[in-house]
Amino acid sequence: MELAAVLTIWGMFSCFLLFPRLGLPPLWHRTAMTLCVAEFVAVGIWSYGSERCVERPCGAFAEAGRTAATYDIPALAVALIACAVIRGLRSRPRPVPPPQRAAAPEPRERPHTPRPRRASRRPTAPR
């Protein structure tokens, strides 16, 4: 049970630091920090509520903290990470296909006009 709490706190704090770097809106990293703080509070309620408890269930308030720290908040944390991954996959730039080249236009037929002949540059001998 403590492992779930530790992993949730570590994961949500990591998300709090990474989400702004990944370009997610501020609501996302605020939500990650809110879940991190909620996990701390739930673990504190569970810890202090079950201090002198010999057998479970200790008290309603301590058991509510235990349930929140063990099941509820980690499930919300996994949902937040899953939503962030889905958003990242949907908003990633897609490869652009190369542009289609238009077929070269057929050369137009021009009427054949003879070119004028150039005069020779060599002087010609008189005849």
Image: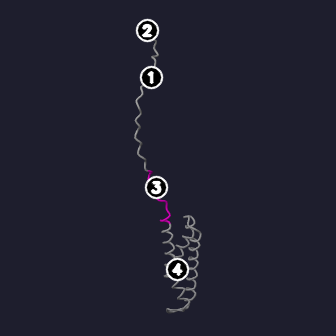
Gap in angstroms between the C-alphas marked 3 and 4: 40 Å
Q: Is residue 44 above or below residue 126?
A: below
Gap in angstroms between the C-alphas marked 4 and 1: 92 Å
Q: Secondary structure at mark 2?
A: loop
Gap in angstroms between the C-alphas marked 4 and 2: 109 Å
Q: Is residue 30 left or right of residue 113?
A: right
| Mark positioned earlier in the residue sequence (2 or 1) | 1
Q: Which residue is mark 2?
A: 125
| Mark positioned earlier in the residue sequence (4 or 1) | 4
**Which label belongs to residue 73?**
4
Judged by depth in the image, the label closer to the viewer, 2 or 3, is 2
Near mark 2 (Cα within 10 A), the count class, few <14, some 14-19 or many ≥20, is few
| Mark positioned earlier in the residue sequence (2 or 3) | 3
Instruction: Find the magenta span and give its range.
Output: 88-99
| Residue at the extreme top of the image, as rendered | 127
Amino acid on which disc 4 is placed: Ile
Amino acid on which disc 1 is placed: Pro
Dominant SS in magenta: loop
Judged by depth in the image, the label closer to the viewer, 4 or 2, is 2
| Mark positioned earlier in the residue sequence (4 or 2) | 4
Q: Secondary structure at mark 1?
A: loop
Q: Which residue is mark 1?
A: 116
Q: Looking at the picture, tell me which residue is in the foreground, 27 or 68.
A: 27
Q: Looking at the picture, tell me which residue is in the foreground, 9 or 29.
A: 29
Gap in angstroms between the C-alphas marked 2 and 1: 22 Å
